Image: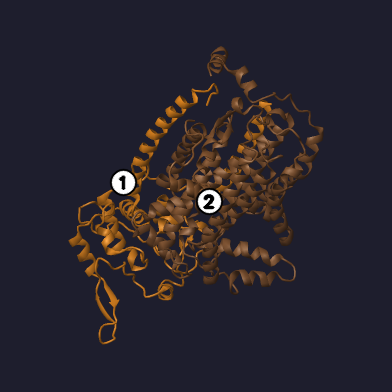
Amino acid sequence: MKNILKPILLLAIFTTISFSSNASEQSKKLLNLEWSFKGFFGKFDRASLQRGYQVYAEVCSACHSMKYLSYRNLAEAGGPEFSEEQAKVIASQYEVTDGPNNDGEMFTRPARLSDNFVGSFANEEEAKAANGGSYPPDMSVLVKARKGDANYIYSLLLGYDDPPSDFTLDEGVYYNTFMSGNKIKMAKPLSESLVQYSDGTPATEEQMAKDVTTFLAWAAEPHLEARHKLGFRTVTYLIIITILVYFSMKKVWSRIETEV
Amino acid sequence: MSDQNYTPKSKLGKWFNDRLPLLTLRAHLTDYPTPKNLNYWWTFGAILTFFLIAQIITGIILAMHYIAHADLAFESVEHIMRNVNYGWLIRYFHANGSSMFFLAVYIHIFRSLYYGSHKSPREVIWVIGMIIYFLMMCTAFMGYVLPWGQMSFWAATVITNLFSAVPLVGESITNWLWGGFAVGSPTLTRFYSLHYLFPFLIFGLVILHIWALHIPGNNNPIGIDVKQPSKDTVPFHPYIVLKDLFALLVFLLLFAFFVFYSPNLLGHPDNYIEANPLVTPNHIVPEWYLLPFYAILRSIPNKLLGVIAMFASIFVLVILPWLDTSKVRSAIFRPLYKQFFWFLVADVIILGYMGAMPAEGIYLLVARVATGYYFVHFLIILPILGYKEKTLDIPLSITDPILENSTNQSLAKEQINKK
């Protein structure tokens, strides 16, 4: 009887695998980095997060909003961990509309830690109008919203290339190896020494792509470090109690002759 | 069992118990005689109970922070993930908990199929179980809509659109379901309301499911009735309680891996993009646990027939106790059924895979064959098998085969003599 089961299951597994390899052949393999935040004990590289914020603030934020983050997040544990003073200074560089005041009028004031990140455009329509009709997606959860997460963002940033000779591109459309259909409306965002890192790290394209991707990964999952930490404790606890319960069970069942 | 004949000692206890025998109900549950040869496939009932309660608790907490409104739902989920204390833990628990719930329920159902737990005298347990399963699918589907991501929105659109296939009144039904002329805020609020209600219906049905189980008692791997309760069964507590607890803990380790280390593995990246009625995702796919039914739905070229086939695929499960004509319960003694059982498992896995693929070319062809086989299994193979199959000899009692297999036969007998 057992002999017939194996072929069936093997057949099912084989069909599944052969189909899935078919499906993955269509897209080009993403660049694969050893991210510090992957794995069971993964943590963000603090310096990389701070540099990544700099790249975001000086480059990406010209078009991309990040509306679910607040300035206080920049000073919170598990993030870039700027000091509270630094975060306050960062916030104060942006202006938000507040009000109405006692006269019933809206006014602008410098942003505080409790304010959400201020975007460059008032609304989606304005963003579209300024970007050739396509909306630069909000970056708050972008890493989680793309297949391949951090590797995809990193690959896309470095995937700009000259199109093959038989490939025609419209005005304002660029060639990217990793974009689906290879057409992207975002111009190549990074170039050598585009930002001046305050910690003296050479701002190569790869370095900037890595830093900003790390920053975006944190932005999408700000409690990742807390999650990994709690996960380790939970799993340790579960393993210990599982062993204890296992031996209790064995002991109790030894009163009768059945094997558990 | 020292407290086997527990009766309340206090005056108040006696007074209360005479009016509502709640205090002696506990004794009924702990002493419940359970076949001693149950294997680990029988622990999934307890695992499911745990997950139902866990889902209800985490769900109630999420509901305190969630806002059911088309413009605010996505944002409120991000608020839970970022600003609510341990909100990320509760949401990931709830989202992955549903996957674990379905994984456990599929094992539970296939265990029933393998060991014939759906057969006489347990048909009512099975039918209640199938109603629970159907409500679970509805609940999970509506829960998937609540984060209001792209997949939420488009899954809601695809599934509610199915009802437009109903002749004459189809369009009226879909408009009624939507509360408008497209999926929008009214749809979201009613899904939210029902998503909160259904788990309590499920909870009530689970009580009936267990009540109905306690009438004939558990089936067991050999599939024969308990002959001598003193020899064949053990009291539920502590034997089964400990075994269920151990299995639950092992299952929780798997669950912890998902919650803490791959919380988004079972979800779709597109659901982190806020719902946009103007942009259709390339492939609209439901959660993994609904994929086999989605494959059946899409494999029929006609919309109405596809919907009928999908509901029929669940309905054949409901009437299974009357389709499976074999008097022998356990597949251990049914050599042919055992093979067909594994064919069915493979068939459902293939259907699930095809449900995740675009409905075209070879995928569609395979999905059609698998859909056909699914119905052939239940409607043709099972009824015929009951008459044609030559079953193996069945042991006389649960205790017999265990003693034969035991390496410490003499020791075991000694123990019995001592008792």
Residue B13 seen in the figure: yes
Which residue of the protein is positioned furthest toward the left in this rendering? Answer: A85
Q: Assess disc 2: are there few (<14), some (14-19) or many (≥20) residues with their C-alpha within 10 Å of its C-alpha.
A: few
Q: Nearer the viewer, residue B220 or A175?
A: B220
> Quick one: which chain is orange?
A
Above/below status of A57 relative to B242: below
What amino acid type is highlighted by mark number 2?
Arg
Q: Nearer the viewer, residue B311 or A162?
A: B311
- Tag count in the figure? 2
Secondary structure beneath dot 2 equals: helix
Residue appearing at x 45%, y 53% in the figure = B57
Q: Quadrant of residue B172?
A: bottom right
Residue appearing at x 38%, y 54% in the figure = B88
For disc 2, the chain is B
Coordinates of residue B387 in the picture (x, y in percent): 81, 35
Coordinates of residue A70 in the picture (x, y in percent): 30, 64
What amino acid type is highlighted by mark number 1?
Lys
Residue appearing at x 64%, y 54% in the figure = B294
Above/below status of A194 relative to A109: above
> Quick one: which chain is brown?
B
- Location of mark 2 (residue): B19
Q: Mark 1 and mark 2 in contact? Answer it, CB < 8 Å.
A: no
Coordinates of residue B85 in the picture (x, y in percent): 33, 56
- Location of mark 1 (residue): A43
